[in-house]
Amino acid sequence: MIPPSDSRRVRPKRALKIVATALVAALALISLRVGGKPEAELSADLPGIGPRTVVTALGREPDRGLRRMTLELLQGERVTPLADREFEPRPVWSFWGESTAEAQIAVPVGSTVTEGLVAGEATLRLTLWRAGTWLRTPDPVTHELLLPVRLTPPRLSVLSSQHYPRQGGSETVVYRFGEHVVRHGVEVGERFFPGYPLPGGGGSFTLFAVPYDLASDATIRLVAVDDLGNRAERAFVDLLRPREPRHDMINVGDRFIERVALQIESQTPELTATGSLVERYLAINSGLRASNRKQIADLARDSAQEFLWQGAFTPMPNGQVMARFADRRTYFYEGREVDRQDHLGFDLASVKRAKVPAANSGIVVMTRFLGIYGNVVVIDHGYGLMSLYGHLSSFEVATGDRVARGQTLGRTGQTGLAGGDHLHFAVFLHGVATDPVEWLDQDWIDNRVLAKLGIATGSAS
Ligand SMILES: [Zn+2]
């Protein structure tokens, strides 16, 4: 038994022990409490390094936070520093407060941004330092990513000859390319026409259109791009034949505007009828026209990868041509010019509510009311080639139907922006309107498309 007087003497001793223990613990903490082992991740947006690949490095240390992060590119003896960042980790005695638990850097590497890069392989090395103490400096964590380096463009050779497209017309090019190519086709100014493998093998081909309004300094190039972004280009057009613009004047009156505006507005929810009659007309003639053209262009993305057509196109055999492709129209209202638009199809007139036959075989991809075109049928003929039939009064086919040449699609009418009963016939290649005249011509198709492709198809039946 301990006498009560003793316990009073023990208390300061115990307190001293507690303080000493705490001091030792604190000393141990500030000597030994380094940050946790950082986690490192490295990734690249391409499967290797070519002209420009973006490498993303990620470091993570949620305990005391990162201290430093470096990224280097190693090729043989050569070390190229790409990034070096330092951070302020949390102090050793602190369990909360500011720190960098996670950091990410994205750096472009490649022949266009990295000096001295050579073909072969390259190692990307991410190094992460964690917080240390006065006694301990833990080794940094490194993480590496090995990537192939390819700096030469893919092989690309043009197999076809005699490329002399007309402005506003279409053309075919046949070619062959080397390994790793992920994108190929023809660039016409800002537009891209994708290529496809030849159905019989032996190469690839692209059917493309030269926009009727292509800028005079725009280039036409066959391109092949590999998975690392290396790009081969060929200028293959022998001659670009210019197109003489044709001008046309159109007077629009109140009665015409009232009829078409009411009809189009009532079937176009995104169009709000505001302003005067002529303002409503202009909203349709320019704004809605542009958005309708985009809706048609969007259809091309899902175009079939097969030739669904055969021989020359024959839209409305008895139709009389009322307006031609790329007519430049100036619109007048009460004697003053109010708008300018280009007519990107053929207008064919016959009797009222005449039967409209499919100009060639294919798959119906649109049957609906589409703004300026009114009731419209669009047929996909494969490889981005489509034909359009506008202003119909009725439909006799449905979206998804497979149609044969000559099959009745519907009847002519004056729905949409039409002054009278007629058919608006248009041909598109990947959403770019092209002159239908070429596609109506069996000789042109034989020489400029089929002969180049080496495909023997039957002529118009
Ligand atoms: Zn038309």
Image (spheres, rainbow, N blue to C red):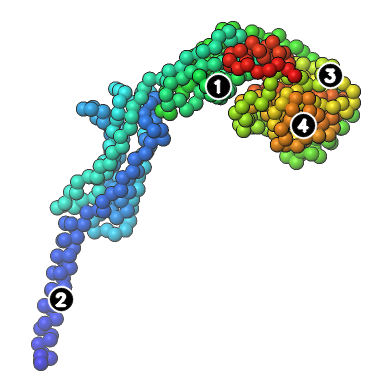
Three-letter code for the amino acid on which mark 4 is drawn: Val
Where on the picture, by quarter, is residue 307? top right
Residue that mark 3 sits on: 319
Question: Left or right of 310: which side holds 96?
Answer: left
Q: Position of residue 302 (x, y in %)?
A: 62, 33
For the question of whether residue 14 can be seen, the reply is yes
Residue 107 marker:
none
- C-alpha span from label 3 to label 1: 37 Å
Q: Which residue is the site of mark 1?
A: 200
Disc 2 to disc 1, how far (Cα)?
A: 94 Å
**Three-letter code, disc 1:** Gly
* Nearer-N-terminus badge (2/1): 2
For disc 1, does the CB lie below 8 Å from ligand 1? no
Secondary-structure class at tag 4: strand
- The one of 99 and 416 positioned closer to us in this rendering: 416
**Residue type at tag 2:** Ala
Residue 109 versus residue 3 in the image, above or below: above
Q: Position of residue 15 (x, y in %)?
A: 15, 76
Q: Is residue 68 left or right of residue 405?
A: left
